[in-house]
Amino acid sequence: MYFYIKALHIIFIVTWFSGMFYIVRLFIYNTEAGDKEEVEKNILRKQFTLMIKRLWLGITVPSAILTLILGPWMLYLMGTIPTWMWIKIGFVIGLYLYFISLQKIYSQQMKGVFKYSSQQLRIWNEVATVFLFAIVMLVVVKESMSFVWGLVGLFVFILLLMSGVKLYKFLRAKK
């Protein structure tokens, strides 16, 4: 039973992350549609709003809920919780806080409120990548990883991601 629950947990984690990565891209495109001429802007916003709604309500939210059900169920079936799992749970809590922030942006955009620039959303999109990196490394490496080296690696990864975002912004501005 444990391995079936684990497999389902992994499947819904993948679909949840897919939804979170793509939803922010759609938020960016929806935001950038505001820079278009009125007719084009209205057409794009209508389409992006539909796509955002379907992705969020049809895939991302259900996957987050199923992940939240299956994770604790798997922990229950494990019996004991190893030390590394508590650290993972901390990252998962952070990931759900990030998810809640996306819900806020979703609600705003559904009301036609655009509080963030496309550049801010691009940076915010990378937060999910950081959580993915940290959680997968922790689950795979577990106790073999030094806590200090793990944090150093995560910090270097964040620096590389942010450098990539800055480089992308520079290359877009150059066009």
Image (tube, rainbow, N blue to C red):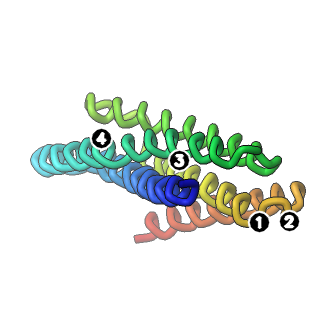
Nearest to the eye among marks 4 and 1: give it: 1
What is the distance, in whole Å, between disc 2 and disc 1 at their CAs?
Answer: 6 Å
The answer to whether the residue labelled 3 contacts the one labelled 4, judged by CB atoms less than 8 Å apart, is no
Hey, what amino acid is under mark 2? Ser
Q: Position of residue 91 (x, y in %)?
A: 67, 45
Q: Residue at x 45, y 59 (%)?
A: 11
Specify few, some or many for label 4: CA neighbours under 10 Å numbering under 14, 14-19, or 20 or more: few
Q: On the image, numbered disc 1 is attached to which residue?
A: 141
Q: Residue at x 41, y 56 (%)?
A: 15
Write down the quadrant of residue 110 in the picture.
top left
Name the element at disc 1.
helix
Q: On the image, numbered disc 3 is attached to which residue?
A: 124
Nearest to the eye among marks 3 and 1: give it: 1
Q: On the image, numbered disc 2 is attached to which residue?
A: 144
Name the element at disc 2.
helix
Q: Position of residue 60 (x, y in %)?
A: 38, 46
Specify few, some or many for label 2: CA neighbours under 10 Å numbering under 14, 14-19, or 20 or more: few
Hey, what amino acid is under mark 4? Leu
Q: Residue at x 32, y 53 (%)?
A: 29
Q: Quadrant of the C terminus?
A: bottom left
What is the distance, in whole Å, between disc 3 and disc 4 at their CAs?
Answer: 20 Å
Lower position in the chain sequence, tag 4 or tag 1: 4
